[in-house]
Image (cartoon, grey):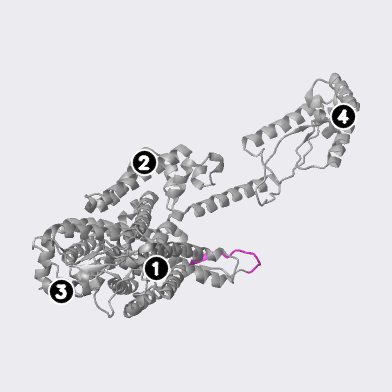
């Protein structure tokens, strides 16, 4: 309910109260109940989304600039959009979701996050215009401050027309006796040293709004991460994390009410009725607009259909991923059918449009996960699937429908708190977007880069090129959204699919499979690590060796220590050199001499000493029995040749560098000693 109220409050400000929080709650309840009962994938949760909010703001500004009725024109667009959605369902257009890849999904999701952050900060800054700071304070003249309402000395034509329409007799109005609200309604002016542009200066309101705004963001983030805290049992931590936003809003409302500072509040009616008195629950599609608007609205309806289709199907693709192990069908066509029908109903009733909300849907799916019971201490539970049912979604929207009768409570919610929730939703959603992870790689040295799975298989320059293309599309989306051509904004969203297809000419299929795969980063990394472990176990079985699993990071130091060089540095150096020189003169063939290679890690001095003594003994044995080995040169040559061939074969198969653990001491004896032992 928190996001619905937040979007409703922002939509109310954007449309001057024509569609606000009470309409959002009623519309969400009605649409959600129908979707939960009739859709093909009831795990998806409907809600207001950033792109739809942008489209509503663009449409309202267009109607205001050209003097058209917003609700009537919106009803025509909604009916055309519903019709076009039915056409998409009938023509099997939902099969086009196969072209929606990570490139399109992340660019779209990034735009939504940026819209959330930008809108929240913009609303907070605008509070400074309504509740300005008095920059000319003089503490010695506080008793002389005054602000009163007076008749405009030079009223404009719009003000005169306003007085005539409402039969306001200017001469009979007691201007100085009017309060702030009455003065604004009668188009009076404020005069005095304590007056701002929109009325008297109100102390502490702007400062308190800023405190509420950032406190909401900080508290929401803290409670959301409380699941990983060390305090309280696991169940309690999970509940606090799941209801982080609700707990934050409730806490801020209580603090604001206790202090009593007149911060701006959510505008809701005292009873169940539309927010504005000049509208009802049914909207005439023509109304005061010209008759031909019912025909030409098919053009913006086409753009709105693209937006609804992309928003709905991108979320549906995320929910229907294989990693969720869903057993029942997807139902893309049926979902779009229900959304289209309810969109037409909401348009006629003057309610907001609702489509699949990505963040809410993912949270809903995560809350329905099935995991195995842990039998051993410390054993991680295994993911078994999702509880696929309709009951939870149905109850969510039934309870939301009951909340429309709680308007006496909703009016205490400060607007800065809703702005803070909006900022938190945008900032927290950036955390799981791979696009922003790749953006951070531009300023990061290679040795400090995280172990992303795509960096194992794709050159860094290609990853940067892919990121630059995606960033260019995002910037272009934002420029169009803020320009006078903002009405064609949905067309650019659709163009993302075609831009992604053009990348096939600049990247190989293998590179795109790692950069543009819908599978999450963590999932792909687990699969690859599992494959590597399986390959290592197969190699170990073939070689008859035992693989010792190691935890933590360790350095592989395969350096070979030459005992001759090391011994020459000790006090036995002269004896060692004489033995080594004498033996080398007797036989020039290196294959007949002892080759002792020790790969040691943290070996003790005693171990090295024992190996050195063993080497001296072997040297003498080799010299004494050289006569024995000479009658059988062919046999010894064959034995050495076989050993070399085996070593070459192992190197060719890539097994020569395998490690069995942090310590792997091995001694290689000469073929002559092997023959003697035989």
Q: Give the alpha-carbon distance from disc 1 to disc 4, as whole Å.
A: 77 Å
Q: Give the alpha-carbon distance from disc 4 to disc 2, as whole Å.
A: 65 Å
Instruction: Tell me the residue at 76%/31% (across/down).
Output: 639
Q: Which residue does the numbered mark 3 point to in the structure image?
A: 173
Residue 669 lies, in percent from the top left, at 81, 34
Task: Return the disc, 2 or 3, that comes first in the chain's sequence.
Answer: 3
Q: Is residue 647 left or right of residue 363?
A: right
Q: Nearer the viewer, mark 4 or mark 2?
A: 2
Q: Quadrant of the N terminus?
A: bottom left
Residue 128 lies, in percent from the top left, at 33, 60
Residue 353 lies, in percent from the top left, at 27, 66
Q: Which mark is residue 504?
A: 2
Magenta part of the protein: which range? 375-386
Q: Nearer the viewer, mark 2 or mark 3?
A: 3
Q: Which residue does the numbered mark 4 point to in the structure image?
A: 619
Principal secondary structure, stretch drawn in magenta = loop
Q: Is residue 467 above or below residue 214?
A: above
Q: Which residue does the numbered mark 1 point to in the structure image?
A: 43
Find residue 11 and report its image quarter. Answer: bottom left
Residue 386 seen from this side: no
Marks 1 and 4: CB-CB under 8 Å?
no
């Amino acid at each position: 309910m928190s996001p619905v109220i937040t979007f409703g409050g922002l939509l109310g400000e954007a449309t001057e109260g024509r569609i606000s929080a009470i309409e959002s709650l009623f519309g969400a309840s009605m649409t959600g109940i129908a979707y939960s009962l009739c859709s093909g994938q009831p795990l998806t949760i409907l809600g207001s989304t950033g792109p739809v909010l942008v489209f509503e703001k663009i449409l309202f500004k267009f109607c205001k600039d050209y003097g058209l009725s917003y609700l009537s024109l919106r009803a025509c667009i909604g009916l055309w959009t519903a019709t076009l959605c039915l056409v998409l369902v009938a023509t099997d257009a939902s099969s086009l979701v196969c072209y929606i890849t990570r490139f399109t999904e992340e660019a779209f999701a990034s735009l939504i996050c940026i819209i959330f952050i930008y809108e929240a900060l913009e609303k907070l800054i605008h509070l400074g215009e309504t509740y300005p700071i008095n920059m000319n304070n003089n503490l010695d003249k506080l008793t002389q401050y005054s602000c009163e309402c007076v008749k405009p000395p030079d009223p404009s034509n719009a003000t005169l027309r306003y007085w005539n329409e409402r039969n306001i007799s200017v001469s009979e109005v007691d201007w100085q006796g009017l309060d702030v609200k009455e003065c604004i309604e009668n188009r009076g002016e404020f005069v005095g040293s304590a007056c701002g542009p929109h009325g008297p200066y109100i102390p502490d309101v702007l400062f308190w709004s800023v405190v509420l705004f950032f406190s909401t963001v900080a508290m929401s983030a803290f409670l959301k991460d409380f699941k990983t805290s060390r305090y309280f049992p696991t169940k309690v931590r999970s509940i606090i994390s799941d209801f982080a936003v609700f707990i934050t809003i409730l806490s801020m409302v209580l603090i604001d009410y206790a202090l009593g500072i007149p911060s701006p509040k959510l505008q809701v009616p005292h009873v169940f009725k539309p927010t504005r008195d000049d509208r009802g629950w049914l909207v005439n599609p023509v109304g005061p607009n010209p008759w031909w608007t019912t025909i030409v609205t098919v053009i913006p309806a086409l753009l709105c259909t693209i937006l609804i289709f992309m928003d709905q199907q991108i979320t549906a693709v995320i929910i229907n991923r294989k990693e969720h192990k869903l057993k029942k069908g997807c139902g893309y066509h049926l979902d779009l059918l229900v959304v289209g029908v309810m969109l037409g109903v909401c348009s006629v009733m003057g309610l907001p449009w609702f489509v699949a909300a990505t963040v809410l849907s993912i949270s809903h799916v995560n809350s329905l996960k099935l995991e195995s019971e842990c039998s051993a201490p410390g054993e991680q539970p295994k993911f078994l699937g999702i509880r696929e049912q309709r009951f939870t979604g149905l109850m969510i929207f039934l309870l939301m429908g009951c909340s429309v009768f709680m308007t006496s409570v909703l009016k205490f919610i400060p607007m800065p708190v809703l702005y803070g929730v909006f900022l938190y939703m945008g900032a927290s959603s950036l955390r799981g977007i791979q696009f922003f992870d790749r953006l951070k790689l531009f300023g990061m040295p290679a040795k400090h880069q995280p172990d992303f799975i795509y960096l194992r298989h794709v050159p860094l320059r290609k990853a940067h090129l892919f990121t630059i293309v995606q960033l260019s599309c995002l910037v272009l989306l934002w420029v169009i959204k803020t320009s006078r051509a903002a009405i064609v904004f949905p067309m650019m969203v659709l163009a993302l699919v075609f831009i992604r297809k053009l990348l096939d000419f600049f990247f190989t299929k293998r590179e795109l499979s790692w950069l543009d795969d819908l599978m999450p980063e963590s999932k792909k990394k687990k699969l690859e690590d599992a494959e590597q472990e399986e390959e290592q176990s197969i190699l170990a079985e073939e070689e008859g060796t035992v693989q010792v699993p190691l935890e933590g990071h360790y350095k592989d130091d395969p350096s070979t220590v030459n005992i001759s060089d090391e011994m020459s540095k000790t006090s036995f150096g002269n004896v060692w050199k004489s033995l080594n020189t004498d033996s080398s003169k007797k036989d020039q063939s290196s294959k007949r001499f002892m080759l002792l290679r020790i790969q040691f890690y943290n070996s003790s001095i005693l171990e090295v000493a024992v190996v050195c003594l063993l080497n001296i003994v072997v040297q003498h044995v080799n010299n004494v029995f050289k006569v024995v080995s000479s009658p059988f040169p062919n046999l010894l040559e064959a034995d050495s040749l076989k050993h070399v061939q085996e070593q070459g074969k192992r190197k060719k198969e890539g097994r020569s560098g395998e490690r069995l653990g942090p310590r792997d001491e091995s001694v290689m004896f000469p073929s002559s000693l092997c023959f003697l032992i035989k």
